[in-house]
Image (spheres, grey):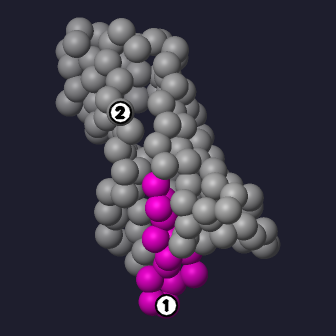
Amino acid sequence: MATGNGDDVNTEGGGFAEFRAHYGTITGTTPTCDLEVHASTDGGTVYRKIGTMPQVVGTDDNKAVALMVYIPKPGSGQTVTKVRYRAVIAGTSPSFAFTIEGRGVPGLAPYALDDDLSEGFAFPGADVA
């Protein structure tokens, strides 16, 4: 089983966000991929799972899945909530090509632009094998 974390993304927290994963080619024998969204309100020391996308398997080439999550507000003394994805991949020689992105949901998430944060957030594309 291969497991990997995406890069941390700083968010203002305290609102809802939608995450979308877009899968490309999937190879291997009985490959499975579980994508989780994790958040840290303490500056990145402890991460907690805040949502899990539907599992993707070998027959799901070129599939997109989505998930709505609540991103908690930053903890005491913190200015951001860190968010990242975690990919848990299993099977024999599994390989998944995917990208994942997240966006605040207008009306359900605080909308703000400032010098340190940008509108929404996106995780860079990932090839996890």
Q: Position of residue 115 (x, y in %)?
A: 79, 72
Asked whether the residues under the numbered discs 2 and 1 touch, taking CB atoms below 8 Å apart as contact, a structural biologist would say: no
Position of residue 101 measured from the top left corner of the image (x, y, whole percent): 58, 42
Judge by depth and name the residue closer to the eye, 110 or 88: 110
Residue type at mark 2: give it: Pro
Judge whether 87 appears above or below 105 on screen. Answer: above
Dot 1, how many residues are within 10 Å of its Cα: few (below 14), some (14-19), or many (20+)? few
Q: Residue at x 48, y 30 (%)?
A: 65
Residue corresponding to mark 1: 77
Q: Which amino acid does the dot numbered 1 rest on? A: Gly
Whether residue 30 sits left or right of residue 34 in the image: it is left
- The answer to which quarter of the image holds residue 107 is bottom right
Task: Specify the segment rendered in magenta.
Answer: 69-84
Q: Report x, y in % for residue 117.
A: 71, 67
Pointer 2: what residue?
A: 54
Give me the residue at 32% from left, 57% from top. 49
Asked whether residue 20 is drawn in magenta, I would say: no
Query: Is residue 106 visible to us here?
Result: yes
Disc 2/disc 1 C-alpha distance (Å):
34 Å
**Residue at 49% of width from left, 19% of height from top?**
63
